C-alpha cells in the first residue's frame, strides 16, 4: 500500500532483471511513487535478494503495489500463440507454472506486497470445456496458497469478455481473488468496450493498468495496436470517472510495452504521467 494514502498515486510497470517494464531508476526519474513489478528471475527472488531490493526501493521512494508473475515459454506474438502459451491455461506446463507462481507469491510476501498478479491465459468460454474444471482447481490452489500468506491474486483482464471473467471468478469462489483491469487489453484482444467492462467487473477491481490501444479491423482474430496513452481508443477521462463510480482509489499504473525502444518508452510514459496528472486534477476540480 502507498504510505501517503493519496488517491490514485501514479505508477509504472517496472522490472529488475527481466520483463517488459522500465528500470526502477527510470520509474524514479519519471516522478511516480508506485510500481507494478514484473517478477524477477528465481535468483533475484531469494530472501537476501528481496531484502536488497526492498532497500533499493526505499532509497528511491518507490512502493511496489503488485508483483506480476510471468512464465518461461510465454509469447504474445499473436492471439493464437497467446492462447497456446500464456499463464495457467496450457495443460502441459500448468503444474510447473503453479509451482513457479507459488514461488512468486513467496517473493511478494518477502517484499511485503499484498498482491500477486498474472495473466491466467485464455479462460475457456464454455464451462463444459474439460479444461475449465482443471483451470478452476489450479486457480483455487494458487488462491489458497496466497491466502495463507495474506496475499491477494489479481487476474489481468482482456483475454476474455467481462461476463466470462465474472463467471470464472464466481466459479473459483475464493475471497482473495480479484482483478487487475487493463482497458487496452480489452481492445487489443477484441473482448469488449473497456469502460462498460470496468463497470461490470468493478467490484473485483483492486489494481489497474493505464494503457491505450486501437481496435483491430478483425477484433479477436488479430491484434489491435498498443498506442501511447491518449492516442488510442480508451477514453481516459471516462476511465477515471468510472474508477470513481466503482470506488477505486488505488494506484494508476502506466504500462507501455515497448521495452525494445527504451528511449521512446521513457518519453511516452513521461507524457502519460502528465496526461494522467491533468485528468486527476480535472476530477478534483469537479
Ligand atoms: Mg496490463
Image (cartoon, helix red, strand yellow):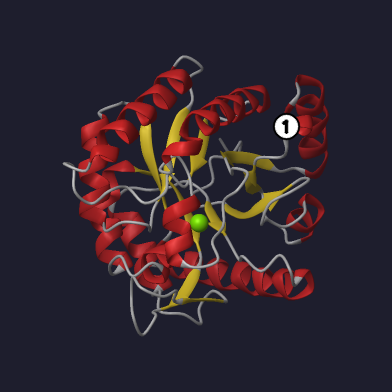
Residue drawn 49% across the image and 64% down it: 280
Q: Residues within 10 Å of mark 1 (few under 14, many from 20)?
A: few
Q: Viewer-proximal residue, 5 or 215?
A: 215
Element marked by disc 1 = helix
Q: Quadrant of residue 198?
A: bottom left
Whether residue 176 is visible: no
Q: Residue 231: percent from the left, percent from the top?
A: 51, 82
Residue drawn 42% across the image and 63% down it: 80
**Image vertical order of residue 174 relative to residue 132, above or below:** above
- Left or right: residue 159 versus residue 210 is left
**Residue that extends furthest to the bottom in the rendered view of this protein:** 217
**Residue that extends furthest to the front in the rendered view of this protein:** 92
Q: Residue 124: percent from the left, percent from the top?
A: 27, 48
Q: Residue 253: percent from the left, percent from the top?
A: 55, 55
Whether residue 224 is visible: yes
Quarter of the image for the C terminus: give it: bottom left
- Left or right: residue 18 versus residue 235 is right
- Left or right: residue 240 versus residue 112 is left
- Left or right: residue 29 versus residue 116 is right
To which residue does mark 1 refer? 42
Q: Residue 178: percent from the left, percent from the top?
A: 37, 38
Quarter of the image for the N terminus: give it: top right
Q: Quadrant of residue 245?
A: bottom left
Q: Viewer-proximal residue, 250 or 189?
A: 189
Amino acid at each position: 500500500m502507498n504510505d501517503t494514502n493519496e488517491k490514485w498515486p501514479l505508477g509504472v510497470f517496472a522490472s529488475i532483471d527481466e520483463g517488459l517494464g522500465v528500470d526502477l531508476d527510470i520509474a524514479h526519474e519519471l516522478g511516480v511513487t508506485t510500481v507494478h513489478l514484473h517478477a524477477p528471475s528465481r535468483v533475484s527472488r531469494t530472501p537476501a535478494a528481496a531484502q536488497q531490493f526492498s532497500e533499493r526501493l526505499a532509497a528511491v521512494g518507490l512502493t511496489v503495489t503488485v508483483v506480476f508473475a510471468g512464465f518461461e515459454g510465454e509469447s504474445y506474438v499473436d492471439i493464437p500463440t497467446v492462447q497456446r502459451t500464456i499463464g495457467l491455461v496450457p495443460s502441459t506446463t500448468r503444474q510447473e507454472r503453479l509451482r513457479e507462481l507459488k514461488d512468486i507469491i513467496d517473493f511478494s510476501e518477502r517484499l511485503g506486497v499484498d498482491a500477486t498478479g498474472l495473466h491466467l491465459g485464455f479462460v475457456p468460454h464454455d464451462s463444459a470445456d474439460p479444461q475449465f474444471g482443471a483451470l478452476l482447481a489450479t486457480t483455487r490452489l494458487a488462491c489458497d496458497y496466497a491466502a495463507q500468506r495474506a496475499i491477494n491474486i489479481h487476474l489481468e483482464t482482456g483475454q476474455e469478455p467481462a461476463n466470462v471473467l465474472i463467471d470464472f471468478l464466481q466459479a473459483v469462489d475464493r475471497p482473495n481473488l480479484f482483478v487487475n483491469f487493463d482497458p487496452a487489453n480489452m481492445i487489443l484482444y477484441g473482448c469488449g468496450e473497456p469502460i462498460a467492462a470496468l463497470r461490470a467487473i468493478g467490484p473485483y477491481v483492486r489494481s489497474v493498468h493505464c494503457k491505450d490501444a486501437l481496435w483491430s479491423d478483425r477484433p479477436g482474430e488479430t491484434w489491435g495496436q498498443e498506442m501511447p496513452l491518449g492516442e488510442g481508443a480508451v477514453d481516459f477521462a471516462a476511465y477515471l470517472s468510472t474508477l470513481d463510480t466503482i470506488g477505486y482509489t488505488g494506484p494508476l499504473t502506466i504500462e507501455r510495452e515497448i521495452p525494445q525502444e527504451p528511449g521512446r518508452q521513457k518519453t511516452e510514459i513521461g507524457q502519460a504521467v502528465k496526461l494522467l496528472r491533468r485528468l486527476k486534477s480535472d476530477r478534483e476540480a469537479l
